[in-house]
Amino acid sequence: MMRELRALVRLAVVSASIIMCGAGVFAENWAQWRGPGGQGVSAEPQLPTEWGPDKNIAWKTELPGSGHSSPIVWGDRLYLTAVIEGDVVPDAKPATHTMGGKEWKHPDSVAGDKKHTFKVLALDVKTGKILWDQTAYEGPVYDNRHRQSSFAGPTPATDGSMVFAYFGPEGLYAYDTTGKLAWKVVEKFPTLGLGTGTSPLLYQNLVILQRDEDNGDNSLIVAYEKKTGKEVWKTKRPIEISWGTPVLVEAGGRTELVTNGSDLIIAYDPGSGRELWRTKGVDSNAIHTPLFGHGMVIVTAGFPVKKVIAIRPGAVADDQRVAWQYAKGTGYVLSNILYGDYLYLVTDNGIVTCLNPETGEVKYEGGRVPVPARFMGSPVAFGGFVAMTSEDGDTFMLRAGPTHEIVRTNSVDEPVYSSPAIANGRIYIRAQKHLFAIGG
């Protein structure tokens, strides 16, 4: 009975994320970081596969400020966060950090001495018109960020009635669809002077945040009630700072909340925060979002060491938890992708490795994009392609399968540092200055 009830709940959640048109399915919502399940994969048919600055662009909208967060879409609304950097604040003192018992500052830490304005935007997906623009926070920030990062890094999440935007130590903010602030939770914590990367995750009536900090003394994962912001549960984690977003995985008749971490990979019960299992972590900066499929959870990292760990979720003996490992092919910031029968790993300069996700068998290594490129945004997959968008704004269309073939290169002719979203028959790409809607 419980298994049947869980299946009905999952069906209801999936159904709520689908837009119906006439007698058939028209589109899926893209309601969180990396879309359905946080995996970067769209099942929509008839998506555009060719575009350029003046080709197949439905609209482009100039955005205030900047940001690395991705757009999210529900129905006829698109939501996005942004940050506007202001002047130096006299006597501003961002959080201090220690290394080996001595005060320490990362050589790439910047901007903690300036005023910032954090914004949450809603746009009309048909026209690109900004419908509302709310300031969540304005003032000095608690900590620095990496010079290549953004204080508007986490992607918001929505359930269609509320929008949840997260700005790390500057708070979690909940808005209704008209832009009215429903509640906020602000808890200050250090980010090693590198900023926040984890995005909010929704489960039933909860908003869940993975909040790891500095040396792990006060790291935790926490859940808030969606309507009120009331804390429902909080679980401490023995994990040094991370920037990854957890995922929800169905295994053995239960839902598991799987988290990436340098020290440990840990799964929790998303309803209570109770730990379900743990295994050794990635021994690197934990930035990538876990992948799941083919009976595996695949957790990856790319710096300082490259690591791919395939894990069996559910009630499995500890010595049987890890199925296979691989130690090449991953990038620093961008998450990898599992699409169809294959796992695709992408390095910072676009070298692709294709593996069998069940066994770790290498299908190919060393697949390259046709021009020199750097990547920060994560790939997405649809219609038999894996789309990889570079920092130059070029999207390389990799044909999915066990051989490497880039079939074309599309461009928005503007730098891109975020990951695309896919909804309503369109692809949405957030570039340095504009948001592009690609498709009819």
Image (cartoon, rainbow, N blue to C red):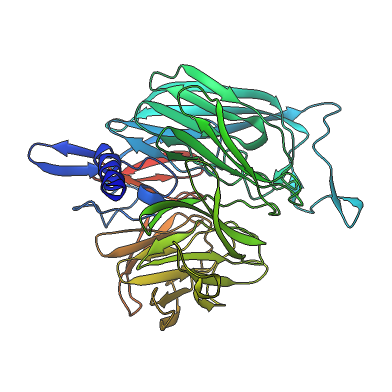
In this view, the residue farthest toward the left is: 23
Could you say which is closer to the camera, residue 262 or residue 237?
237
The correct choice, above or below, for 316 with respect to 81 in the image is: below
Circle count: 0
Residue 386 coordinates in the image, percent (x, y):
35, 63
Could you say which is closer to the camera, residue 363 or residue 140?
363
Whether residue 376 sits left or right of residue 239 in the image: it is: left
Residue 420 coordinates in the image, percent (x, y):
40, 49
The correct choice, above or below, for 367 with respect to 409 in the image is: below
Whether residue 91 sits left or right of residue 39 in the image: it is: right
Can you tell which quarter of the image residue 110 is in?
top right
In this view, the residue farthest toward the front is: 1
Let me know if residue 440 appears in the view: no
Residue 373 coordinates in the image, percent (x, y):
51, 65
Let me know if residue 201 appears in the view: yes
Which quadrant does the C terminus fall into?
Answer: top left
Can you tell which quarter of the image residue 191 is in?
top right
User: Residue visible at 84% across and 42% down?
Assistant: 96
User: Residue visible at 55% across and 75% down?
Assistant: 319
